[in-house]
Amino acid sequence: MKKKLIIGIIIGLVLYTISSCSFMGTSITDRIGYFIVDLNSSRTNIIDNFHDAANNYDNLDANYFEKGFLYISMGPHSITGISVSGSTVTGTLNYNDGGAQSAPIILEMRDAGDIMGENWKIYSFTVDGATQFN
C-alpha cells in the first residue's frame, strides 16, 4: 500500500512538472494576444507585456502609445497574419483612422527567463517601418 502511494505521488509530480512548463509560461503568440487586449483596454497593465531589458522600458506607462498607429482612438487594434520565426513575429496591425487601416508590424521577442518556464515578452517593435518601442 505504501509503495503504491509513493509511486502515485511520483507519477503525479512528474505529470505536474510536465504540464506546468506550458501552463506557467507565456508563449510568443499568447504574449501578442495579451498585448492586443491591453492595447484595446485601459492600458494600465501594458508594461507587463514588455521585456525589462528593453531600452525604453522605464518610460512605459498607460500613455506611452498615445501617438501614431497605436493611439487609443484608432482602435480597436488587432494583429492578423501572425508568423513566428525564432523570436521574430511579423503580421499586420489593423486599426481605425476614420476607416479600416492596416500596416505591417514586426515584433522582436525575448524570453524573460522566468524559472517556471518560458515567458516571452516584447523587446522591440516597428509599425510600417517606424520604431514604436525598443
Image: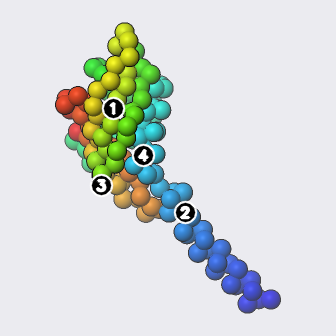
Distance from disc 2 to disc 4, alpha carbons, whole Å, reads 18 Å
Which residue is drawn at the image coordinates 42% and 46% (left, top)?
29
Quarter of the image with the C terminus is top left
- Mark 1–mark 2 contact, CB under 8 Å? no
Q: Which of marks 4 and 1 is in front?
A: 1
What SS does tag 1 mark?
strand
- Mark 3–mark 2 contact, CB under 8 Å? no
Q: Which of the labelled discs sits on residue 92, or is there none?
A: 1
Quarter of the image with the N terminus is bottom right
The mark that comes first in sequence, 3 or 2, is 2
Location of residue 99 by image quarter: top left
Could you classify mark 1 by the number of other residues whose Cα lies within 10 Å: few (under 14), some (14-19), or many (20 or more)? some
Say which residue label 3 marks. 86
Question: Residue 31, relative to residue 113: is it above or below?
Answer: above
Q: What residue type is labelled 1?
A: Thr
The mark that comes first in sequence, 2 or 4, is 2
Distance from disc 1 to disc 2, alpha carbons, whole Å, reads 32 Å
Location of residue 17 by image quarter: bottom right
Residue 21: % across, % down: 50, 63
Q: Which of marks 2 and 4 is in front?
A: 4
Q: Which amino acid does label 3 sit on?
A: Gly
Say which residue label 4 marks. 29
Q: Which of marks 1 and 2 is in front?
A: 1
* Depth check, front residue: 113 or 78: 78
What SS does tag 4 mark?
helix
What SS does tag 3 mark?
loop
Question: Residue 12, relative to residue 124: is it above or below?
Answer: below
Residue 11: % across, % down: 64, 78
Distance from disc 4 to disc 1, alpha carbons, whole Å, reads 14 Å
